[in-house]
Structures are given as structure tokens and as C-alpha cells.
Amino acid sequence: MSISSPDSIASPQPVSTAPEVAQSSNENAFRRVFISTFITIFLAELGDKTQVTTLLMSAQSEAPWVVFLGAGTALVATSLIGVLLGQWLARRLAPQTLDTAAGAILLAITLGLLWDITHL
């Protein structure tokens, strides 16, 4: 009869199942996309014309919570349109085509704004 040392006795290890791993991976992907989207949109919206307009409407209306609800609803609606349009385009175009088209559109907007500034 042999005596086992405490080191040789294996303690039960939790067994990870495939659904748990997939759920953890999905949660991490959700978290990454959510945080990335929030930071990008938050920074893009700071100081833009929507924020200035909301500030002025709130100051003039004396009903800041109504302005907040109206502005929030409008931003949710425009975001929904963007998400649905993006999903529709993603099903029909290759990612490289979408990247190229987005770059070309942003470049055209930039050139148009520069043209306006230089020809005032």
C-alpha cells in the first residue's frame, strides 16, 4: 500500500464546455464593439452642430428634459437608419468596397469643405 503525498492528489478542475467558451467569446466581442462604438460616436458628436443646436434649444425652451428626450429620440432614429443601411450594404458589397467608398465619400466632403473655405 502506498501513501500519496498531498501534491500527488489531483484537485478537481473545472471543466469548460463549448457553450461556455462561445458565450464568453460573444460577451467579449459585444463589449469590444459596444465600447468602440460608444467612444467613437461620443467623441464625434462633441461640439458638433447637433450639440450646439440642442444647447440653444434647451436654453430657449425652458424645458431641458423635453429637449433632451426629443434630441435623444432623434439621435436614436438616425443611428437606427445608419445601422440598417450599413447592414443592407454589408450584405451586398465586399468589405473592401465599403471601405473604399467610405473613404472616397469622406474625401469628397473634405474637398468640398476646403473649396467653400477658400472661395468665400
Image: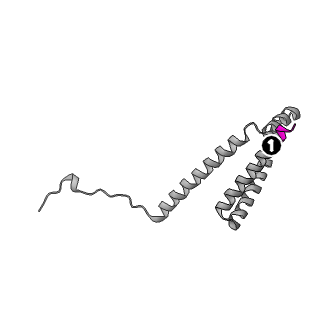
Q: Quadrant of residue 119?
A: top right
Does 8 sit above or below residue 49? below
Q: Could you tell me the amino acid type at mark 1?
A: Leu
The residue sitting at 68% across, 40% down in the picture is 43
The residue sitting at 11% across, 62% down in the picture is 1
Crowding at label 1, few (<14), some or many (≥20) Cα neighbours within 10 Å? few
Which x, y percent locates residue 85? 75, 60
Tell me if residue 118 is in the magenta stretch. Answer: yes
Which x, y percent locates residue 13? 34, 58
Compared across the picture, whether 61 is left or right of 99 comes to right
Compared across the picture, whether 5 is left or right of 75 comes to left
Q: Provide the residue designation for mark 1.
A: 113
Compared across the picture, whether 68 is left or right of 39 comes to right
Q: Residue furthest bottom?
A: 92
Tell me if residue 61 is in the magenta stretch. Answer: no
The residue sitting at 69% across, 45% down in the picture is 41
The stretch of residues the image draws in magenta is 112-120
Which x, y percent locates residue 18? 46, 65
